[in-house]
Image (cartoon, rainbow, N blue to C red):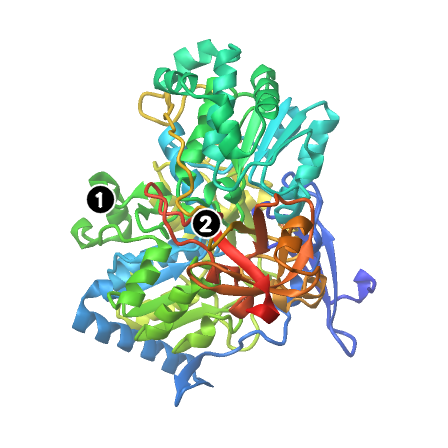
Amino acid sequence: TFSVEQANKIMATQCPFCSVQCKMEVVEDLSGSRPAYQVTAIPNKASEGRLCVKGMNAYQHAVSRERLLHPMMRKDGALTRVSWEEALEAVSSRFTELQTKHGADTIGLYGGGSLTNESAYLLGKFARVALKTKYIDYNGRFCMSAAASAGVKTFGIDRGLTFAMSDIPMAECIILAGTNIAECQPTLMPYFTRAKDNGAVIIAIDPRASATVSIADIHLQVKPGMDAALVNAMLKVIVDEKLTDEEFIRNRTKGFDAVKEHVSSLNLEEIADYTGVSIELIRKAAIQFGKARTGMVFTARGVEQHADGHMAVRNFLNMVLATGKIGRAGCGYGAVTGQGNGQGGREHGQKADQLPGYRLIENPDDRAYVAGVWGIDPNDLPGKGVSAYEMMELVHGGTIKGLFVMGSNPIVSNPNATLVEEALERAEFLVVADMFLSETAKLADIVLPVSAYLENEGTMTNLEGRVLLRPAGRSAPGEVRHDWQILCDLAYSLGKEQYFPFRQSEEIFNELRVASRGGIADYYGITYDRLRKEEGIYWPCPALDHPGTPRLFGERFAHQDGLAVFQQVDHQSPAEQPSEEYPLYLTNGRLLSHYLTGVQTRRSPVLAAREIENVLEIHPLTARKHRLEDGALASVRSSRGTVIVRTKFTSAIREDTLFIPMHWGDAQNVNRVTNDLLDPNCRMPDFKTSAVRIQPLAEY
Ligand code: SF4
């Protein structure tokens, strides 16, 4: 460390690694023989001046020697340094050639939930205006699509938390379902411990006794994929015990009778049997939640990444509505978004079916409005494309021949990674914009170097729907450009520069504000000037003098009639069940020190050293049955592929379930094994329920 007086640069910024978006200051001292860095948290209303180990070390990847510093093009089989002019000309001419030969939809674009709002917005516009292709989607499909689609159906709106984080300590009962906040969003945890100090009962629903579960009073250690059924049982108890809020149901909702009739007919013993949770615990949890005056339900990927993830979330929302726990202090629903801009990244047009402001690409009024903002004919806007994994299938099948990937590593993040790897090898032309030579970039024909969070000004929207301005503190190194600059440069090469005249991120944001005006995620009243003065503004914020909306649904829901909608949820067992050949469930997730596919955190020496290789969490009794030693290498195989990992014995996991993190590629990539079955409602893959078998690597 060193004193701040010695420093030659102080950068106020935000951590790029999760949806809390903690504010921090990075001091860079270049005066000595080696650069030195010091990181401190900046007190603010969201993270309250906290940082976790990821945030403390996030600068390390930004200053890594592995950063890509100039464009590269594949020549004679090897990626070779080229000028920006040559790279941009090659991308535009090859895309044009493919589109002339095979039609506009032969190009696909694949974005990311860590992009700023400005880059996410511009990528959507670039697809629809510069390339006129319908194929665009992004890695957030795997992060939020089940909760987002459930929120839209039930409430008429999708925002991660329906309340400010500061509401959490007011809740008397909190359900944490399929979420490991202690490792994924560590600085959010003190809100829950404060609630507990205030007397709140915390109920965790998870097949693993994760670090988050350690604060729970009741742990429902459910079998993977059985959340919807478990909630039906809890709803039955709430109805039988007359713990429903009849006035709220009558005045604020519709559709409860069908749900009530359905859950009343269910048999608790049967549900206890197939969920693996005892009737006693089901009753205890349901009564605690039902009788509490205030309460909150949080879900994350453990509930959502299933082929019935949409319905599972809807059932949790049924429970929130049935007990009237929304729209007032200490109440509400929260989808705990994972990615740094998981919220904003899904609002501005990266999704296959959406235009900015959460407008729908198939709605004629929405098309006309956005086309007007963009200065094009609505008839020139392409239609709805397909989800992220389905795009990979189309690349594999040859329908999509050219792919542009920005801020994503799809080989590692998609299910059934073997198919995805084959698809990208088969693609006729692959362009990747990234900071590093990721597993995906290694296969590219052209690689474009992009700036890091310390270098790129822009807005991010955290899990509360709070829009925050992240300033740029240092210049981009080498020939690196910002994502949005690259899109503008490519538009110029394609002769579409009149639609992309932006020279600063603020200019893009000002167009985004107008494009989102009147939509569900209305940013119109938010400006860079306001964001510089205020500590973030919650959308919807429809006017310049509007204060923003921290808590939603106080008076009405966002459907036209103002009512929330119940949905009867039938029990659906996971399609892939353990069998004689594949006798165990596999689920996946995150570790404390890593983010997404690890492209950035594996290049941070401190974070990489903390968790240096992938692991298989396995119950010792299960391991013994399969002749596995603690710390030995094992192969885990499904019908789709094999992953090689080192065993880590833990009794915190169910005996019928294995857990492997998602941060490594190649042979350690858990997604070589995971299930690519898609949810029919939102196209979320069933990452969390794969049937597998294990054996010592030596026997493989
Ligand atoms: Fe904050 Fe999340 Fe970054 Fe940790 S990873 S410092 S909780 S934004």
Q: Residue type at mark 1? A: Ala
Quick check: can you spot residue 217? Answer: yes
- For image coordinates 40% across by 77% down, the residue present is 446
**Residue 628 spot, x, y in % from top left:** 65, 60
Q: Earlier in the sequence, mark 2 or mark 1?
A: 1
Q: Is residue 688 above or below residue 539?
A: below
Instruction: State left or right for residue 546 relative to residue 426.
Output: right
Query: What residue is shown with label 2?
Result: 579
Q: Residue type at mark 2? A: Ser
Which disc is residue 180 wearing?
none
Instruction: State left or right for residue 403 relative to residue 618.
Output: left
Q: Looking at the picture, tell me which residue is in the foreground, 553 or 353.
A: 353
Give the distance between the C-alpha atoms of the residues marked 2 and 1, in whole angstroms: 52 Å
Identify the element where label 1 is drawn: helix
Query: What residue is shown with label 1?
Result: 368
Q: Looking at the picture, tell me which residue is in the foreground, 25 or 671.
A: 671
Q: Is mark 1 within 8 Å of ligand 1?
A: no
**Mark 1 crowdedness (10 Å alpha carbons): few <14, some 14-19, many ≥20:** some
**Residue 315 spot, x, y in % from top left:** 44, 29
- For image coordinates 36% across by 39% down, the residue present is 517
